[in-house]
Image: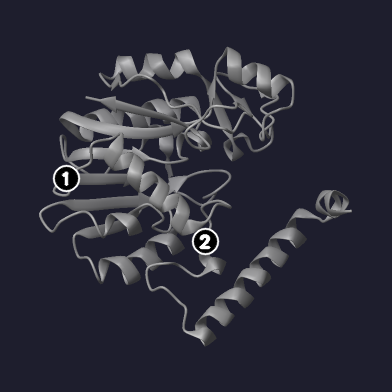
Amino acid sequence: MRSVIKQFVPRPLKSALKHTHAFLIDALDGLQGERDPLTPPRSLIFVGDGDFKKVGEEFFHYFIELGGLKPGDRVLDVGCGIGRMAVPLTKYLSASGKYEGFDIVARGIEWCTKNVTSRYPHFRFQVAEIYNKAYNPKGKYPAARYRFPFANDSFDFIFLTSVFTHLMPEETENYLTEIARTLRQGGKCLITYFLLNPESLKLVETRASTLDFKYQMSGFRTTDQHTPEAAVAYDENFIRGLHQKYGLKIAEPIRYGSWCGRKNFLSYQDLIIATK
């Protein structure tokens, strides 16, 4: 019965029900005095279905253990959302370090500025007016030509979580260009992807994957031919080639994710760490 209901509830109604449920829980938390000032209300969270705190803490450990992040580092969070990755970093980055984040969703930046920057002035957030059919259809600038608003060699560590999973090939290449430009020599980046290789392709084709990348487009696969930005998967060799082209040396091995149904994995998406 549960699967039947899930299948036939219209998408706008499901979204409305989810929002109403989140609003009610937020109200209850407020009445019980359980509101964490560094956790956004559930009704505002737009960055996926995972637990806000748990996902943030998961990647916080990856940044340190795999990426070698230090307390005094200068950090850039591309696609910072509503602070899921920023919040756990507030207890780690020292005043001599800094955090910069940008995102295309204004309400996330507004919440972060009000609740994070007010407490941690070395954490700054800004809106990027980038067009995205799925997430910011009113954006002014194409992602394929967007220049990060920072000088060359500005950062020790740059990360993107679930960003290239929503960008087209020319946009992804431009972002890698900008990562290479703004990352200092010897700096590191951590990026998540959906990577297509013999293992993941076989699992997708046998329907073991949580995402059905059945539509082959120009240079990528997607789950939605009408709104391809909804979920984008790239050939692993294509991504490796782009990293090499822009002087970003991949730290082997790639940490593959569980998204396609594989048994051995680190996280949900595939994770690449590279050094300039």
Asked if residue 58 lies left or right of residue 26, the reply is left
Percent of width and height locating residue 31: 53, 87
Mark 2 is surrounded, within 10 Å at the Cα level, by few (under 14), some (14 to 19) or many (20 or more) other residues, namely some
Mark 1 is surrounded, within 10 Å at the Cα level, by few (under 14), some (14 to 19) or many (20 or more) other residues, namely some
Q: Nearer the viewer, mark 1 or mark 2?
A: 1
Please identify the residue farthest to the front as the structure is shown: 264
Quick check: can you spot residue 78? no
Q: Is residue 17 above or below residue 267?
A: below
> Which element is circle 1 on?
loop
Identify residue type, mark 2. Ile
Q: Disc 1 marks which residue?
A: 73
Asked if residue 148 lies left or right of residue 264, the reply is left
For the image shown, how many numbered marks are present on the structure? 2
Percent of width and height locating residue 121: 19, 65
Asked if residue 257 lies left or right of residue 146, the reply is right
Q: Earlier in the sequence, mark 1 or mark 2?
A: 2
Residue at 58% x, 81% y is 28
Identify residue type, mark 1. Asp
> Which element is circle 2 on?
loop
Q: Is residue 32 above or below residue 158?
A: below
Residue at 25% x, 71% y is 118
Percent of width and height locating residue 41: 50, 70
Q: Disc 2 marks which residue?
A: 45
Percent of width and height locating residue 272: 38, 28
